[in-house]
Image: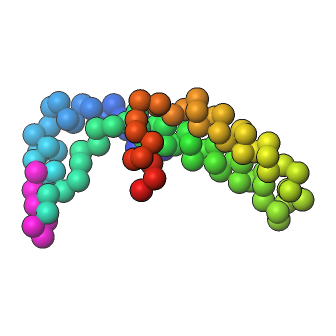
Amino acid sequence: DQALKFRLAFDKMRTNEMPYLDYFKETVEGKVRIGPPTDCEAVDRLVQFLHIFYESTLILSASKSVAAHKIYNEIVNITRNISLVGDNSGDDNELKY
């Protein structure tokens, strides 16, 4: 969630800052560094999913109340919200692993 707040700064550094880009071209122990962040939309969808999952987890928490009767409603809620957040253009097999 914090990275999304700095999205504009990342975009600006990508277009204007050569040392920023050079940092990601360096190798560390024979491996190229990961980055810079380029897929903020995917991060935004992930944050939305985690928020949905977190809220449902709080509702189903047995430490707060008896939750057996709430399970079906929360599963439907999670499924509906993930369908709205998700991008159906991806391959579902990518999600398995």
Identity of the residue drawn at 72% across and 45% down: 75
Examine the image and state in which quarter residue 11 appears. top left
| Residue 76 screen position, x and y as percent | 73, 39
**Which segment did they paint magenta?**
25-30
| Residue 84 screen position, x and y as percent | 58, 29
| Residue 4 screen position, x and y as percent | 42, 38
Indicate left or right for 66 with 12 as reference. Answer: right
Split into 4 quadrants, where in the image is the C terminus?
bottom left
Query: Among all residues in the image, which is located at the extreme front?
Result: 93
Q: Is residue 27 magenta?
A: yes
Judge by depth and name the residue closer to the eye, 37 or 10.
37
Q: Is residue 33 visible?
A: yes
Q: Is residue 2 visible?
A: no
Judge by depth and name the residue closer to the eye, 15 or 50.
50
Q: Is residue 75 magenta?
A: no
Examine the image and state in which quarter residue 6 appears. top left
| Residue 33 screen position, x and y as percent | 18, 56
Identity of the residue drawn at 9% across and 56% down: 26
Identity of the residue drawn at 24% across and 31% down: 12
Identity of the residue drawn at 85% across and 56% down: 67
